[in-house]
Amino acid sequence: MAAVRPARVFIVEDEPKIVALLADYLRHEGHAVESFGDGAVALAAARQNPPDLVLLDVMLPGLNGIEVCREIRRFSEVPVLMLTARVDEVDRLLGLDTGADDYVCKPFSPREVTARVRALLRRSRASAGSDGRPWVVDEAGLKIVWKQSVLPLTPVEFRIFARLLAHPGRVYSRAQLLDAVHADLRDVSDRAIDSHVKNLRRKLLAADPAADPIHSVYGVGYRFDPPPEPSGPSEPY
Ligand code: CA
């Protein structure tokens, strides 16, 4: 069986025995594990430095798992695997309202959990980068996901960035970018493009401090340069 590339996994659970058991198995698979006994703390940590996957118990003190998952979905599409003791809760967990990707019912076998983790990591990595690209453009939803973070873009910023992403390395003039934002937005001037691009770059940096892929080309406009592919073995995962 092909190994899955190691990931950063959050375990959010207030029962130390379960945390220890899961952490043990996940570390054995090569993953870096961080555990949290409190939903709000885990949420803050995920915002600061998004993990690759979240294992999230429903029953938590303070903010419960459903609330944590809902909050995570506001800024990230990281895979979330819920742990629940109640089978009757499952529909709700996987519903649009919560946004979890999968669930495991307690009591569970740790092997079952690691198998689900493996499957979710494969799936999310495949969708985020089937072509090696760290971004996904959702035209219908006016959403751009950058390394699993949903960028909080305005519709104008979305259109500008989607246009730049369509042809990495190509230089677009301000007039071409204006076309991209449609004629219905008549208040957008040449100069306004500059300020939209500035905001776009700021949001990208906030989502991914290593990324500043939009460059201004003097006297012409803007260009998107894709980030270098991660180094290391390029085996499919
Ligand atoms: Ca619990």
Image (cartoon, rainbow, N blue to C red):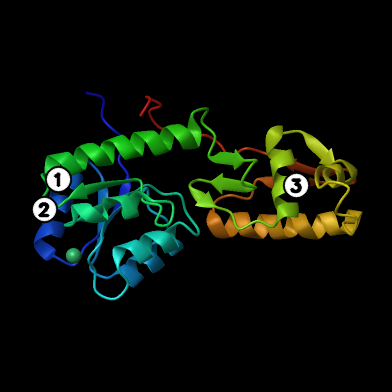
Q: Which residue is mark 1?
A: 25
Q: Mark 2: few, some, or many residues within 10 Å (few <14, many ≥20)?
A: few
Q: Earlier in the sequence, mark 2 or mark 3?
A: 2
What amino acid type is highlighted by mark number 3? Ile
Residue located 41% across and 49% down the image: 78
Q: Mark 1: few, some, or many residues within 10 Å (few <14, many ≥20)?
A: some
Q: Which residue is mark 3?
A: 160
Name the spot of residue 76 as percent of width and height, x first.
Answer: 47, 54
Which mark is nearer the camera, 1 or 3?
3
What amino acid type is highlighted by mark number 2? Leu
Name the spot of residue 201 as percent of width and height, x first.
Answer: 67, 55
Report the front residue among 57 and 163: 57
Contact? badges 1 and 2 (CB < 8 Å): yes
In the rendered structure, find residue 21 and report the number of the disc placed on it: 2
Q: Secondary structure at mark 3?
A: helix
Marks 1 and 3, how far apart at CA: 44 Å
Of all residues, the one furthest to the front in this rendering is: 88
What amino acid type is highlighted by mark number 1? Tyr
Q: Secondary structure at mark 1?
A: helix
- From the viewer's perspective, tell me whether residue 113 is left or right of residue 136: left
The quarter in which the N terminus is drawn is top left
| Residue 63 drawn above or below residue 160 | below
Q: Is mark 1 within 8 Å of ligand 1?
A: no
Q: Mark 3: few, some, or many residues within 10 Å (few <14, many ≥20)?
A: many
Residue 196 in view, yes or no: yes
Marks 1 and 2, how far apart at CA: 7 Å
Report the front residue among 8 and 64: 64
Marks 2 and 3, how far apart at CA: 47 Å
The quarter in which the C terminus is drawn is top left
Q: Earlier in the sequence, mark 1 or mark 3?
A: 1
